[in-house]
Image (cartoon, rainbow, N blue to C red):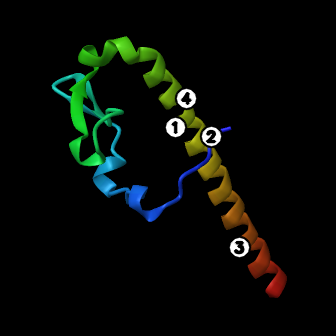
Amino acid sequence: MASVNTSNEDFVAIRPEWTIVYRDVDDEKEYHVKWKELPYDECYWEFETDISAFQLEIERFNKFRSRSSKLASMKQRSSVKDDVESKNYNM
C-alpha cells in the first residue's frame, strides 16, 4: 500500500482560479486542465475537441462533480432545516 506524503514541501494551496473547470467560448467548451507532469501554475485552457481522447475522464469528473454538488446541496438544506427547528424549539 502506498503511503501518503503529508510534508509541507508537497503542499500546494488551491487558488480560486484553479477551481474553474470549464467555460464556453464561441459556442465551444474549454476545460481548465492540470496536466499530470506540470505544476498547478501551468494549468491551461484546452478546447474540448483537442482533449477528446480524454472523454472518459471528463465524463467521470462530471459525474463526480454532480454527486459532490448534490451532497453539498443536501448538507446545506439540512443545516437550514436544523437552524429553523432550533429557532422554533427556543421560542
Q: Nearer the viewer, residue 58 or 6?
A: 6
Q: Quadrant of residue 34?
A: top left
Check whether the beta carbons of the residues at disc 3 and disc 2 lie within 8 A of each other: no
Please state the horizontal and vertical placement of residue 32, each as a whole percent of the image: 29, 36
Q: Earlier in the sequence, mark 3 or mark 1?
A: 1
Q: Earlier in the sequence, mark 2 or mark 4?
A: 2
Please state the horizontal and vertical placement of residue 77, each as a whole percent of the image: 66, 57
Check whether the beta carbons of the residues at disc 1 and disc 4 lie within 8 A of each other: yes
Identify which residue is drawn at 55% across, 44% down: 69
Residue placed under numbered mark 4 in the picture: 63
Please state the horizontal and vertical placement of residue 28, each as a whole percent of the image: 23, 22
Indicate the amino acid at tag 4: Lys
**In the picture provided, is 17 more to the left or to the right than 91?**
left
- Which quarter of the rendering shows the N terminus? top right
- Residue 75, placed above or below residue 1: below
Residue placed under numbered mark 1 in the picture: 65
Identify which residue is drawn at 22% across, 33% down: 45
- Residue 14, placed above or below residue 29: below
Local secondary structure at mark 2: loop
Identify which residue is drawn at 40% across, 60% down: 9
Q: Nearer the viewer, residue 30 or 36?
A: 36
Residue placed under numbered mark 2 in the picture: 2
- Residue 62, placed above or below residue 72: above
Q: Residue furthest top?
A: 53
Q: Earlier in the sequence, mark 2 or mark 1?
A: 2
Residue placed under numbered mark 3 in the picture: 83
Q: Nearer the viewer, mark 2 or mark 4?
A: 2
Q: Earlier in the sequence, mark 3 or mark 2?
A: 2
Indicate the amino acid at tag 1: Arg
